[in-house]
Image (tube, rainbow, N blue to C red):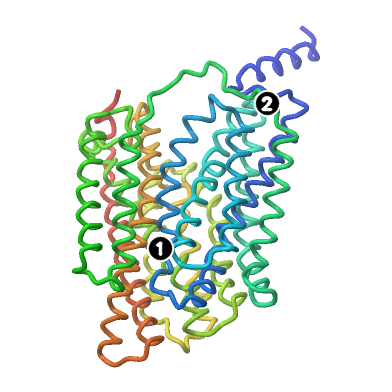
């Protein structure tokens, strides 16, 4: 057999191992088109905190700062599940193009929002578009590209995320300072629009998944999930302003708690068809530990993601560009350390120690902010503290999924990954809302005691960051409790 024939045969067999067939000469352009839109979505997600601090300050609504992001994250969980079921049937163009259209429309909605409720609704809806594109990118790389080229193209996702994480916060800050927060939305809308045009122009119309088998969708569990998450988030963010004993807040809390109980019962009965594998918690304790570590590890990062940026802009009076620099330091640490931790895991094959260490680093990041942050804190100290979080953030990026691979039976690894992802999303919605509620309550008590409003709000955010640090320590304990002896429990 000639080398040329063997190479041709290998290439043919390689192409047979793709679930979504696109002509080889078109694959690169389709992928690049999707990456442009992917970058546009990450532009929004990295610039959100820069812009929101100014939007909330204009409305004097700092106590609701986290509400939009929390609601958006909750919706992203549901949208991720829905889009994952639809994209094999509908194809790339409809799901990815439709996601970008939703995001672009919501950009204009934000620019035109005249009040807080309108802003919150639009931000929440934007989560549908964010999830539709972001959540499907990795799986599409595996489906579009044959095995010999998957690793190379998968790496482009990390590169795109890294560029957005390092460049966008500072760029958005400079735009906010010089041209207003609206300019950020104009620029990212242009990028997203280019991605949309390229996706529609380059993607074939027939990109349904080969051997597609319809799966039952957990519509009841999804609806209940939205209800209980939304009620808890709204109650936490508006509890102080409406009054914790007001009928509206009590109703939201009751509906939220009853919804959570109903969600657990429904998901337990559905088993493998559930969007959240509750039954696996009972079968294998490692699932619970992965959930707890992912939840509290993400909660520990909320101080850096949300509160520090607002604190610097509103309390310390820094420019938007200056408040973005600590987040850039954080992002550089994440980008640099992720492959290092990946190499260490590949060499040692053990995730427990790495996971505990990374979670401890994000806990220290939050603790140090809670202890040292004040209106006169030096920028050098802030950058130093941000580095801790950046070094540890890998626990949320990759290591929690490595833990699922190492501590769960092979048949349940996908469920373990879903548990980790949903835990991160719940921490970014309910967890963030609870910390915001604590911050609001502390600030309100200080105002009642005679403290000036801005100083009271600063004290509230400092307390929230201490709570975030405690969350990180709980995540460390959960990581250390992972046990290889019960790995095969719950196998199917």
**Callout 1 secondary element:** helix
State the mark number for residue 160.
none
Circle 1 is placed at which residue position? Answer: 67
Q: Is residue 350 visible?
A: yes
Real-space Cα separation, disc 1 to disc 2, in angstroms: 38 Å
Q: Residue furthest top?
A: 1
State which quarter of the image contains the N terminus: top right
Position of 261 with respect to 141 (left or right) is: left
Quick one: label 2, few (<14), some, or many (20+) residues within 10 Å? few
In this rendering, the count of numbered labels is 2
Q: Find residue 19 and report its horizontal and vertical position in percent.
A: 58, 22
Q: Secondary structure at mark 2?
A: loop
Q: Residue at horizontal 36%, vertical 38%?
A: 416
**Pointer 2 residue:** 205
Q: Position of residue 279 (x, y in %)?
A: 24, 34
Q: Is residue 139 left or right of residue 175?
A: left
Judge whether 208 appears above or below 284 on screen: above
From what the image shows, is residue 148 above or below residue 476? above
Residue 446 image point, x, y percent = 28, 86
Name the image quarter holding residue 3.
Answer: top right
Q: Quadrant of residue 223?
A: top left
Which residue sits at x=60%, y=19%? Answer: 17
Compared to residue 368, the image places residue 130 above or below, namely above
Tell me whether the residue at label 1 lies in contact with that at label 2, contact meaning CB atoms closer than 8 angstroms: no
């Amino acid at each position: 057999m000639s080398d040329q024939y063997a190479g041709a045969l290998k290439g043919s067999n390689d192409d047979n191992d793709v679930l979504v067939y696109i002509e080889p000469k078109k694959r690169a352009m389709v992928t690049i088109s999707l990456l442009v839109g992917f970058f546009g979505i990450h532009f929004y997600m990295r610039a959100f905190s820069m812009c929101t601090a100014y939007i909330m300050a204009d409305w004097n609504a700092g106590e609701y700062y986290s509400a939009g992001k929390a609601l958006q994250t909750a919706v992203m969980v549901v949208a991720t599940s829905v889009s994952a079921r639809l994209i094999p049937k509908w194809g790339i163009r409809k799901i990815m193009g439709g996601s970008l259209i939703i995001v672009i429309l919501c950009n204009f909605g934000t620019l035109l929002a005249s009040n807080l409720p309108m802003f919150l609704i639009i931000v929440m809806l934007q989560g549908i578009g964010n999830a539709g594109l972001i959540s499907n990118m990795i799986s599409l790389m595996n489906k579009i590209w044959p095995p010999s080229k998957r690793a190379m193209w998968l790496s482009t996702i990390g590169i795109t995320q890294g560029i957005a994480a390092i460049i966008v916060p500072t760029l958005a800050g400079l735009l906010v300072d010089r041209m207003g927060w609206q300019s950020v939305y104009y620029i990212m809308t242009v990028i997203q629009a280019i991605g949309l045009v390229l996706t529609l122009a380059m993607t074939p119309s027939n990109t349904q998944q080969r051997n597609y088998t319809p799966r039952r969708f957990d519509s009841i569990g999804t609806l209940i999930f939205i209800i209980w998450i939304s009620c808890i988030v709204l109650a936490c963010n508006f509890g102080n302003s409406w009054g914790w004993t007001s009928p509206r807040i009590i109703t939201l809390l009751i509906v939220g708690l009853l919804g959570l109980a109903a969600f657990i019962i429904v998901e337990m009965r559905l088993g493998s068809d559930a969007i959240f594998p509750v039954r696996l918690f009972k079968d294998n304790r490692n699932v619970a530990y992965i959930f707890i570590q992912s939840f509290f590890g993400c909660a520990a990062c909320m101080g850096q993601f949300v509160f520090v940026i607002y604190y610097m802009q509103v309390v310390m009076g820094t420019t938007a560009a200056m408040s973005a620099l600590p987040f850039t330091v954080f992002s550089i640490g994440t980008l640099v350390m992720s492959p290092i931790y990946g190499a260490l895991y590949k060499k040692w094959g053990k995730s427990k120690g790495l996971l505990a260490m990374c979670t401890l680093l994000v806990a220290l990041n939050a603790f140090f902010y809670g202890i040292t942050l004040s209106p006169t804190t030096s920028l050098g100290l802030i950058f130093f503290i941000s580095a801790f979080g950046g070094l540890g953030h890998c626990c949320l990026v990759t290591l929690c999924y490595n833990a699922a691979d190492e501590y769960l039976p092979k048949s349940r690894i996908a469920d373990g990954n879903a548990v980790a992802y949903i835990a991160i999303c719940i921490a970014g919605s309910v967890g963030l809302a609870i910390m915001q509620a604590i911050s609001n309550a502390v600030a309100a008590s200080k105002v009642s005691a005679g403290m000036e409003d801005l100083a009271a709000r600063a004290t509230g955010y400092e307390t929230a960051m201490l709570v975030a640090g405690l969350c990180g320590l709980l995540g460390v304990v959960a990581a250390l409790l992972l046990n290889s002896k019960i790995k095969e429990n719950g196998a199917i």
